[in-house]
Image (spheres, helix red, strand yellow):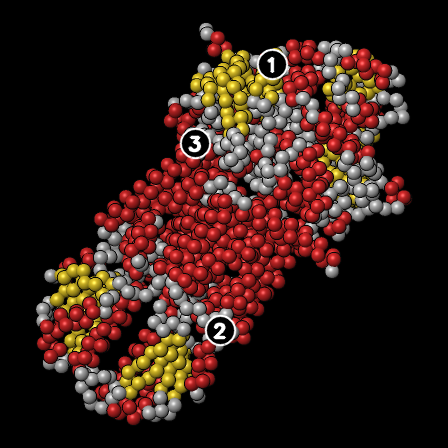
Amino acid sequence: MTSTSFIRRLISLIRKETRQLLRDKSNLAVGLLLPMVLILLFGYGLSFDLSNARIAVVVDQYSPQASSVLSGLSGSRYTSVTGYATMDEAEQALRHNETDAILHIPSDFAKKVAAGNAQILLILNGASTSVASSVKSYVTGAIATASAIEADRQGRNGVGAGVTIEQRMWFNESGNSTWFLVPGLIVLILTLIGAFLTALLIVRERERGTLESLFVTPVRPLELVLAKLVPYMILGFIDLVICLIAAHWLFEVPIRGSLLSIMASSLLYLLVSLALGLTISGYAESQFQASQIALIASFMPAMMLSGFVFDTRNLPMVIQVISQILPATHFMSLIKSLFLDGGSTKLLLKECAIMLLYAVVLINAARLSLRKRLK
Amino acid sequence: MSDDARDVVVANNLVMTFPGMTPKSPEIKAIDGLSLRIKAGKMTAFVGPDGAGKTTFQRLVTGLYLPTSGSLTVLGIDVTRNPQAVQNQISYMPQRFGLYEDLSIQENLDLYADLHGVPQEERQKRFQRLLAITDLASFTNRPAGKLSGGMKQKLGLACTLVRSPELLLLDEPSVGVDPLSRRDLWEIIGQLVKEEQLSVIVNTAYMDEAEQCSHVFILHQGKILDQGSPADLKSKADGLTWVVRKPPAMKTRVLQAKLLEQRQYITDAVPYGDWVRFICCQQKDIDKLRPSLDQYELHSRQPELEDAFMLLLHAAQGYDDQEITDFKQITMPTQQGSATDQDKPVIVVRDLVRRFGNFTAVDKTSFAVERGEIFGLLGPNGAGKTTTFRMLCGLLPASSGFLEVAGMNLRTARAQARAKIGYVSQKFALYGTLTVEENLTFFGGAYGLSGAHLKSRIKMMQEQFSLSGSARSEELPNGFKQRLSIAAALLHAPEIVFLDEPTSGLDPLARRMFWYTIGKLADQGVTMVITTHFMEEAEYCDRIVIQDAGKILALGTPDEVRRQAGMGENADMNRAFIAIVENARHATHSAKEGSSS
Amino acid sequence: MNSLFFWLRRVGFLIWKEALTILKDPANRVILFAPALMQALLFGYAANYDVNNVDYAVLDQNHAHSSSQLLTHLDGTGVFHRIATLNSSAEIPDIISDGKALLVITFPPDFERRLSSGESAPLQVILDGRNSSTAGAAANYISAVVADFNQQQAGAAPAISLETQAWYNPNLESRWSMMPTLIAALSMMQTLLLSALSVAREREQGTFDQLLVTPFTPMQILIGKAVPPVLIGLIQSTIILLIIYFWFKVPMNGSVALLYTGLLFFNIAAVGLGLSLSAISTNMQQAMLYTFLLIMPLTLLSGLLTPVQTMPKVLNILTYANPLRFAIDLVRRVYLEGAQFSDIAFNFIPLLIMAIITLPLAAWLFRNRLY
């Protein structure tokens, strides 16, 4: 008897939450439109792979040797080379952000090459290190090739000799940044759905006085929490499917782990994230506070601290600890692993156990915030 | 069976304290050592001034508050230990019922029926009946957020009544509900009590509602001031209640003011058509008054519950004469403009129409309001009063028609035009997180006051409305919130003040004070446009208009309107109102039937 | 003159009221200012593409002098930490997929022989590509170490060598280029939300009508509503700026006045956007969700995480509607490059256009809400 009335009340509350979710178009905009926009942005917009580095070249005196260096550079599809007559002009261009770097080939270059100790100066704009690093590696590569050709021409030893590196990038053979961004995107999207859509659910009812009426009914706090989770779980599930479809067909990211474990762990994380939103909502004093907290507690940490773009291995110890506290970090490492290397059972169990713990704790916290007492 | 079994609520030495506004300020005792028993199968009313602890008591009974000390048993269950067991068996309608505004009427009803576990077969019958009584049947698909304030209240009550509980708690259920619906609501409640032996506890500001209950508790500062059956309580005013007729040349409220000046003998005086009803402090006081009243017609009258309430309350708190005398010192600035301006109506409305989609909220309405007039806008919920109001204040554009306030259309007029009006909205609409003083400072500043002048105005308003400056506005009891709203609207001494149901939720004492203030201001040439659901308050108005379905049904002085309703000068306004609205509705109904056949 | 004074005094009351509703609650004060502090510290450490801590494993099938010499070279960098020495290639998958090591270096059995015979001696490096940017950076680092090693072995410099200088950031620390952008990015989120909630909250609580019947003009309401969030945004920016300068010691090359002028324009544009959102929202939930809907693309298309240059053409054009893109460029260039007004004047134009469109739009929407 009690369990049937529990189910009946729960269904009724779920129906109510679903209606409220569907009536306000802003929910759907954030729930469905935003994930798609993010997918497209990440798939097509965001890339660490600089494809068009602008290099200003100043050649004090042209020589065959200088030309061979330059042809190596301009032949690359990653760089576009513009000649400048003087260093002053080139430096001006760098200051005005018209070029990303300056390559200076000095006047005695040909002579020094012959002597085997030629130097080329590369000036980078350190204001944007990601551009600077890319430019540096392109130029280094081009120069090394030119140097080898020159050495070969002179018949000097040491080209083929020495240690060479045979590099193999596991899990991401082409070193493509999309492959590691897209699984991370799933984490980001599920975090957002959770925090943003649920962050106002309880505090709004409290502010509008609907909770007081609900409290004096046979409803139990847990029923209220569960009813608020279900519709958003479904919405999140739809987003998850969209993400997986996009990952597989649009971005052709390999899905090496089992689809089942990806789905299951994603749903578990979704639950954690929704429960986190509800907990914020349950304890915030006003909608204003809840929305600010949701913004601060969800999006930025998930983007910056979870290992999404910035590798947690590079972080100082304290920050690593903080990052480990975030549920997003655990799901991030799991989902990347599931996508790219198939994921070990051990990892799956460990991270899922952690997320389950979070889910239980947070759902309970949200339930306690709905204890039937007014402040 | 023990005694307790027949008592639905037993409280013993119940205390509920709240922390003060600031950590240093003293605790507030909302309920102060309350001991009482409430009988099963009866209707019990709690009345008392704002902040007396009525709402706190209901929240304690529902288990929403944990008492500081004392014991409280509800339906034989210790509610402090097992609130859920109590909540399973009771229904509760809080002051602000939590309707889901994005859900439709039907969906709100379904939700509460599901939560209370009302079986499907029983549900349909019940819904039909509730919807019929509340007049909501024709738009069950409309979202609750799109309903007028009174309709929301009715829907809230309908949601509370989806089942017959062991105990029904109603916290001011008829605030903002028009007289027709109020009569209907009380009929439902009365029927339920009779048919299902329902136990009801109701907080109310309407004494006629309390009179329908079998037992009344008068609460004051968290304590019981008095209790008994309405008849018992009424008898306390025996021989003290009188009525006096005004001479033809005098305004009723002038005579009322005259009477109220004799504070030492007269506890209370209210206008009633051409008459003023008053209560003496003691039996012998009437003899002392006779000399000053001998030019008027004087009769004794039957005491009502309100008389007893006023007497008890005055005795308990000692009437603050200061409020009245101070008020006279308020001087409104002399009105600008030429002498001809003085004679022109300050508000002119001709053929005003407002449509929302297919729905016509206000239909070809015309009226004019003279300077210094108290103009009452009456009508059932959803009649178009608030829409008319919002158009007058420039908050809503009219669909068509002519509209002029203080010589301008406020919607298109420059901002300075708005400086001439004051506005008190239906719902509390000042900044809840700010203190009383901060709110007043802001609104004073908004109207261009500043410096010492602003300070003195604020001080004056605070004294006049007994508002302490440091209290957070949202934490004020209802009545004080209302006072604050009115104070904010009067700060800049406007020419015209619009008040949308300013007395809803106010206790009788506060309403007296309010109308006294309004009368004084009108005498000084301030024009007042007021909506109200307390029909007896129409008596304070110089002229009233009754609106229904967007159309004007009656327009004139209270006596003229009474006559239009085919009633004598002694008829009470409530009945006159109901008669006019029902006749009009009946006429349109039969006209429709006539045209369709 | 006098009427201007009265006009401004009224606006002053509105600003005072706005500030009071936002800041009166101590919890709100914490929420508005503590996160800026915490985030600046956290992200200052986190926002780091530099690889300075690489765990690796070795599978040495040769066990020769040269292999250990190369490893000494590697360990000498201070960046590479050998965490395991493997015995067979079968151990490689586990150590990589568990994330214990970022890379595994394998010396083949004939490594020493090939090296001494002047042949090329291939060194196998297996990297964990799950984070391609870290892996790429580590690979580059190893290449540099190996090139250095080769040069030492050969005893001669290569025919052409490259000397690199980095302006404004000599050690190419990614923190230096990341952190100044936070001055704009972090404060934008909260100010945008703050302004988006302001009108929506008044609508939801019914106070907006009370405001509209007062003699305030839409312009006054606009200024009253815009000033507090702009100031709060600037205070947040200041907190972040101080942390960058004093805690992370990123040198500031530009003029503080120019930086603040830029931030002021940026904040006005952002607040204009927020107020417009607010004016079309019926309640706080909507205002919040629309804000979030906007914040995401604004952040991602700003150059905060990935350079604007690397974006495809279409998106690149879209970024012109993004105030944050220009603010980030402006802040970074003023802070690091010490740019003058003439260098960055271009950034002001979109910000100004944004403010000119959004602010009057918001003011109009106050009275004429779209249903």
Q: Report the residue at 60% width, 40% height from top.
A: B435
Badge 2 element: loop
Q: Residues within 10 Å of mark 3 (few under 14, many from 20)?
A: some
Q: Amino acid at mark 1?
A: Gln
- Of residues A165 and B80, which is closer to you in this image? B80
The answer to whether residue C133 is visible is yes
Q: Amino acid at mark 3?
A: Arg
Q: Is residue C304 above or below residue A362?
A: below
The answer to whether marks 2 and 1 mark residues whose Cβ atoms lie closer than 8 Å is no
* Mark number displayed over residue C339: 2
Q: Is residue C213 left or right of residue A117?
A: right
State the residue position of label 1. B227
Residue under mark 2: which chain is it in?
A: C
| Mark 2 or 3: the one toward you | 2
* Mark number displayed over residue A371: 3
Separation of residues labelled 2 and 1 (CA atoms): 81 Å
Badge 1 element: strand
Q: Position of residue B512 (x, y in %)?
A: 72, 26
Q: Report the residue at 74% width, 35% height from top.
A: B550
**Quick one: quadrant of the C terminus of chain B?**
top right
The answer to whether residue C299 is visible is no
Quadrant of the rendered image containing residue B586: top right
- Of residues B427 and B246, which is closer to you in this image? B246
- Of residues A32 and A191, which is closer to you in this image? A191
Separation of residues labelled 2 and 3 (CA atoms): 57 Å
Q: Report the residue at 30% width, 78% height from top.
A: A141
Q: Report the residue at 37% width, 36% height from top.
A: A364
Q: Is residue B589 left or right of residue B160?
A: right
Residue under mark 1: which chain is it in?
A: B
Separation of residues labelled 3 and 1 (CA atoms): 34 Å
Q: Position of residue A26 (x, y in %)?
A: 52, 48
